[in-house]
Amino acid sequence: MGNKKVQKLPSIRRMPTYLHKLKQMRKNGLDTVSTTIMARYMNLEPIVIRKDLELTGVTGQPGVGYKIDELIDAIKSFLNWHNTAEAVLIGAGSLGRALLGYEGFEDYGLNIIAAFDADPSKIGAEINEREVFDINRLPEMTTRLQVNMGILCVPNEFAQEAADMMVEGGINAIWNFTNVSLDVPDHVVVQREVIASGLAVLSVKLNQQMLTD
Amino acid sequence: MGNKKVQKLPSIRRMPTYLHKLKQMRKNGLDTVSTTIMARYMNLEPIVIRKDLELTGVTGQPGVGYKIDELIDAIKSFLNWHNTAEAVLIGAGSLGRALLGYEGFEDYGLNIIAAFDADPSKIGAEINEREVFDINRLPEMTTRLQVNMGILCVPNEFAQEAADMMVEGGINAIWNFTNVSLDVPDHVVVQREVIASGLAVLSVKLNQQMLTD
């Protein structure tokens, strides 16, 4: 991975927050937004906002700011969120259930259509209108339904096995909530999600705050 | 916020993952680890690994690598995770319940000691051995218990009100899972957690993969 890509990561991570705010503003009848207002909402310097939004190909007009409709469109294109992506979720434990219950994903073009688990007591259950299927049916079902995204929430020890089944079922994007570095073919992209990452940032901020107080 | 700080963010976010892997290695009887092995696990270039770990003040020895014990210690100091931090959680909805059920926080020195909610049907319940209290008791209880971290999982429309109560109760670090930009005094640090951030990164990766295939 090149250094340039790495430095873009925080900008990409901020895109859903821009999108959320812009949609809210549009709902409130606004047409344009200034960098200053966005900077205040994001709690970042205006220069960071400008650089982030430049990634989408849109530049603000001096004295006017950004056209909200145009910016929403550009961010969605940048993220390829114009088309709804269908995903399956593997592992209906406490985190998996929370993700199935999360209403916000639709705003981001993500539709979780089914869940899979190995636990007979979970198979057949319905969580927020999505059925939990036997994990052994995963490869056949994702192939047939042409789903290409999988959300991995199984315990660490089953992560690689579950990933193998996803790959077998034609999934080429894995959102990995386990702590395992998955071994997958080159054409499969993986994004590892570490819930404690934010906690680390908060701890460092608090530490710095206490040092400067 | 300075630009330098912003660029360090991805490094800080990766610290819990380093910590997890190092602890696992120590459990397996290893004493040292090379940059190359860490780079493979993290799926990053060795130079990124070296720069990340430099932040903790530890440098690897040529031909030997990093001493695992020393590195674990240094990362914990960097994050101020040597002492367990006690936190309360506000909003026992689906995400809040998932966080209460998550066993991994203890590894990161976080102990959620109680939850708060406004919903009478939730007050008095016990989730993973933590009681759910009436949110009106929050300021008094966090003051008495000297808790200084709060995890905010309420619906957006109640976010500011809940944050005000936390500040009143002496909390100075808020892990904010809502979409609201909180208005808090200068001495309070806030880390906003956007679950869709990782999805944005995954989408961009998948997009780039499809463009280069």
Image (cartoon, coloured by chain):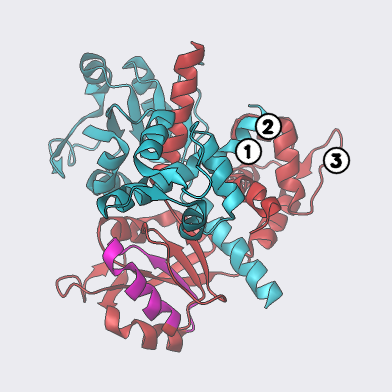
Chain colours: A cyan, B red
Whether A209 is among the magenta residues is no
Depth check, front residue: B5 or A29: A29
Identity of the residue drawn at 41% across and 48% down: A17
Amino acid carrying mark 3 in the image: Gln
In the image, residue A39 sits, relative to residue B165, either above or below, namely above
Which quarter of the rendered picture does the N terminus of chain B lie within? bottom right
Mark in the foreground, 3 or 2: 2
From the image, tell me which residue sits under label 1.
Answer: A7
Q: Position of residue B132 (x, y in %)?
A: 27, 73
Mark 1 Cα shell of 10 Å, populated few (<14), some (14-19), many (≥20):
some
Amino acid carrying mark 2 in the image: Asn
Q: Position of residue A170 (x, y in %)?
A: 34, 16
- Disc number at residue B61? 3
Whether B152 is among the magenta residues is yes
Left or right: B80 in relation to A75: right
Left or right: A191 in relation to B136: right
Mark 3 Cα shell of 10 Å, populated few (<14), some (14-19), many (≥20):
few
Element carrying mark 3 = loop
Point out the stretch of residues depicted in magenta. Answer: B146-167
